[in-house]
Image (tube, rainbow, N blue to C red):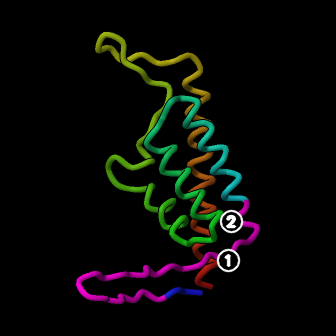
């Protein structure tokens, strides 16, 4: 279902309803939400604020059956400075890069979750337009 955009003008004030594509919540979407929960927990365990907020917002959209959540997840991947470039477990002390204990395992977990989230979001997108 799609809500069409329209503008209503009353005097000098314009009101705009935005378009919204409703997501068909299925098993793949529910699995994606569960994986996003894991991803957010991993990001927050390393105090990664930007991407944890990004995926919390996408998760909220998915729970609201809003297709914008899928678009948001997919737009995080690709390009310079994208989620693909994120490495956890780093800090700087007196201007020197330091690695936190367990950073290798943390990043292996992160890479697995990145793959799962990207794959599941792509599958949900395909199902929506099948």
Cβ–Cβ below 8 Å for labels 2 and 1? yes
Q: Is residue 122 depicted above or below 10 in this figure?
A: above
In the rendered view, tell whether residue 15 sits above or below residue 94: below
Q: Is residue 68 left or right of residue 23?
A: left
Give the side of residue 63 with respect to residue 82, left or right: right
Which residue sits at x=38%, y=81%? 16
Labelled disc at residue 24:
1
Q: Could you tell me which secondary element the residue under label 1 belongs to?
A: loop
Farthest-out residue, left: 12
Figure quadrant of residue 65: bottom right
Quadrant for the N terminus, please.
Answer: bottom right
At x 49% / y 67%, what residue is drawn?
71
Write down the region rendered in magenta.
Answer: 4-30
**Residue 28 picture quarter:** bottom right
Could you tell me how far apart the alpha carbons at marks 2 and 1 are, in whole angstroms?
8 Å
**Residue 53 percent across, percent down from the top left:** 49, 46
**In the depicted view, which residue is nearer to us: 64 or 52?**
64
- Which labelled disc corresponds to residue 32? none
Please determine whether, in this image, residue 123 is positioned above or below residue 111. below
Q: Earlier in the sequence, mark 2 or mark 1?
A: 1
């Amino acid at each position: 279902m799609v809500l069409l955009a329209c503008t209503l003008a009353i005097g000098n004030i314009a009101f705009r309803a935005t378009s919204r594509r409703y997501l068909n919540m299925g098993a793949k979407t529910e699995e994606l939400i569960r994986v996003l929960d894991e991803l957010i927990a991993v990001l927050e365990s390393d105090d990664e604020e930007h991407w944890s907020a990004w995926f919390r917002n996408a998760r909220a959209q998915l729970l609201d059956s809003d297709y914008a959540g899928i678009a948001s997840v997919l737009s995080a991947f690709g390009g310079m400075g994208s989620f693909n470039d994120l490495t956890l477990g780093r800090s700087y002390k007196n201007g020197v890069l330091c690695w936190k204990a367990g950073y290798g395992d943390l990043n292996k977990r992160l890479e697995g979750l990145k793959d799962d989230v990207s794959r599941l979001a792509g599958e949900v997108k395909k199902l929506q337009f099948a």
